[in-house]
Amino acid sequence: MDGIRIGHGYDVHALREGLPLIIGGVRIEHEKGFVAHSDGDVLVHALCDALLGALALGDIGAHFPDTDPGYKGADSMQLLAKVYGLARERGYRLVNADMTVLMQRPKLRPHIDAMRANIARALSVPVDTVSVKATTEEKLGFTGSEQGAAAHAVVLLTRA
């Protein structure tokens, strides 16, 4: 059955003082931001990988390599729109996306509605198809010690 596709994505970025923190297309005031070639939007990168995985098209690094200076500082929301364009070209549409950010600080709850709206807008889908959650890891591991952040994304695609 080729009418339904499921994809999972995972991304991680280190945190460093003095860099911008952008998650779900939202710039969040914080003393640390993501070390990355692009804007480092860990949530959107995981979503891109989930979409590419559902299509069996590799990962975000294969499509937007960090060795290409053209992607230096790239807006991940634009990359997401391009990735979703690949799904649409193949006759698929998003049924839903479920994502989780793993990060000790800052608290992301105040920004989740804006993240959902940004992602829905980039994909031209209703906001109720986009779920964003956030959790800490109780000060355990690299996310708990604030060395970095991670995100998981799962998508369901169906034939348009």
Image (spheres, rainbow, N blue to C red):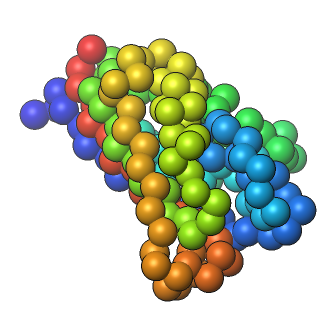
Tag count: 0
Q: Is residue 67 left or right of residue 102?
A: right
Q: Nearer the viewer, residue 17 or 63?
A: 17
Q: Quadrant of residue 87?
A: top left
Q: Nearer the viewer, residue 159 or 124?
A: 124
Q: Is residue 121 above or below residue 155?
A: above
Q: Quadrant of residue 74?
A: top right
> Does residue 9 show up?
no
Q: Is residue 58 above or below residue 80?
A: below
Q: Position of residue 109 (x, y in %)?
A: 51, 48
Name the image quarter holding the N terminus.
Answer: top left
Q: Is residue 67 left or right of residue 160?
A: right
Q: Position of residue 90 (x, y in %)?
A: 37, 22
Q: Position of residue 159 (x, y in %)?
A: 23, 20
Q: Is residue 94 above or below residue 74?
A: above
Tell me what residue is drawn at x 67 percent, y 38 percent: 26
> Does residue 154 show up?
yes
Q: Nearer the viewer, residue 160 or 34?
A: 34
Q: Is residue 93 left or right of residue 102?
A: left
Tell me what residue is drawn at x 49 percent, y 85 percent: 140
Tell me what residue is drawn at x 33 percent, y 27 percent: 129
Tell me what residue is drawn at x 27 percent, y 36 percent: 156
Q: Position of residue 119 (x, y in %)?
A: 52, 30
Q: Is residue 46 above or below residue 96?
A: below
Name the image quarter holding the C terminus.
Answer: top left
